[in-house]
Amino acid sequence: MSDSISVSGRVHHPRLDALRCYAVAAVLFSHYFPPGLTRHLFAGTAGVELFFVISGFLITDILFGYRLSGPNTLGHLGRFYARRTLRIFPIYYLYLLVVAVTIPGIAWQEMRWAVGYVYNLFEMSHPASRPLLHLWSLSIEEQFYLIWPLVILKTPMRHVLKVMVALVLFSLCFRIVVPGVPHKLSTISCFDAFGLGGLFAGLRRFDPAMLSRLLRMRWILWLALTWFVGTIFTSFTTWSLPDAGFRTALAVISFHLLGACVPSEGRSLRDSSWWLDGRRRRYLGIISYGIYLYHLLPMLWMEGWLEQLLKPLAEAGTASLIYYNRYLIGAPLYTGFTIILAVLSHRYLESYFTRLKDRRFS
């Protein structure tokens, strides 16, 4: 099978869609299952970190394509931001509208932070409302989109890979030197993930031999996996590994996952990979933005009804059953409704704006 295909003049890597499916599944698991379990497994953090690395790769690859097509920086920036706007904004603001209409009690003073794509800054010092608590990551991605194109398009080509390495190291050092910042919510703290994804794109284009050597250095991957597993184990104890390296470990793991999905010159992928091939997984990856954006709505709409449904268990004195059944029944129910919402959104809204951006800004 082909490792990549051309879509609207761009190269599309189908296996990245499967990777997105796993990333969004990890986020759903973290929100749909008991917090006592999910807070020790860090599935949501791992899923978001994987999304960041994938975004770093894809956006950097697009920007390099622009840069190699000619020196028109302003034209490239306009084209990039127009396409991003049509891809991201319509269903994002639709989601905020649905939240405002169907879920009472959210103050405009809070909602405006989400409207301005700076909700991560709000969460740094305020408790997040439940329907908005996942928007911090989308705010960070949007802030990344504002900064990264200038880095890629304006840095001299001979220095651009060095700059990406420097940003990865700076992000890690920032988390070490400034420990009091809520690093999950800081854009600077996330630049090692974006930077490693961008570095993968840059090496793939300009130094594929170095990329192959890095991917063959398995000891780096095993060190990152050990850090990740060690963090899970120590979360059950009073002792913990330094938190500053945890997100970098996840980014390194994600970097290697990219290597399983994206071919480069002189390095092909295996013809078959059971965990990356499959139409359903890839389709869920294609609609993963909608799944991520909408996934809290079914839970907020239906959890009261589910509590009433399970109330007889509590009245019978089986309080623990109502607690666990709330998740065992709720998780597949919420997942099913979320996928339905994402499918409808992709078919009737997102696909229209995708065609529009390809027609107007291809």
Image: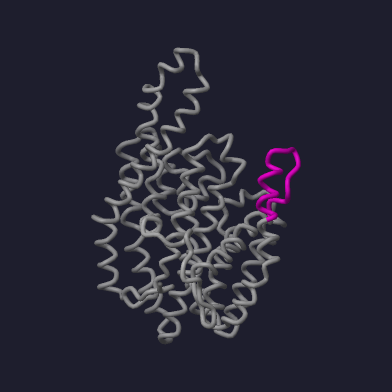
Q: Is residue 190 magenta?
A: no
The part of the image, by quadrant, that contains residue 177 is: bottom right
Residue 230 counted in the magenta span: yes
- Give the quadrant of residue 102: top left
Q: Which residues are magenta?
A: 226-244
In the image as oriented, which residue stretches furthest toward the top? 316
Seen at 36% across and 59% down, the residue is: 279
Q: Quadrant of the N terminus?
A: bottom left
Residue drawn at x 43%, y 80% is: 65
Q: Is residue 17 above or below residue 7?
A: above
Would you place residue 268 above or below residue 233 in this image? below
Instruction: Judge left or right: residue 332 versus residue 120.
Output: left
Position of residue 213 relative to residue 146, above or below, is below
Residue 106 figure quarter: top left
Residue 201 drawn at (x, y percent):
52, 74
Towards the viewer: 319 or 242 = 319
Residue drawn at point x = 40 percent, y = 78 percent? 74
Q: Position of residue 283 (x, y in %)?
A: 36, 58
Front residue of this view, candidates 325 and 70: 325
For residue 99, side relative to residue 252 (left or right): left
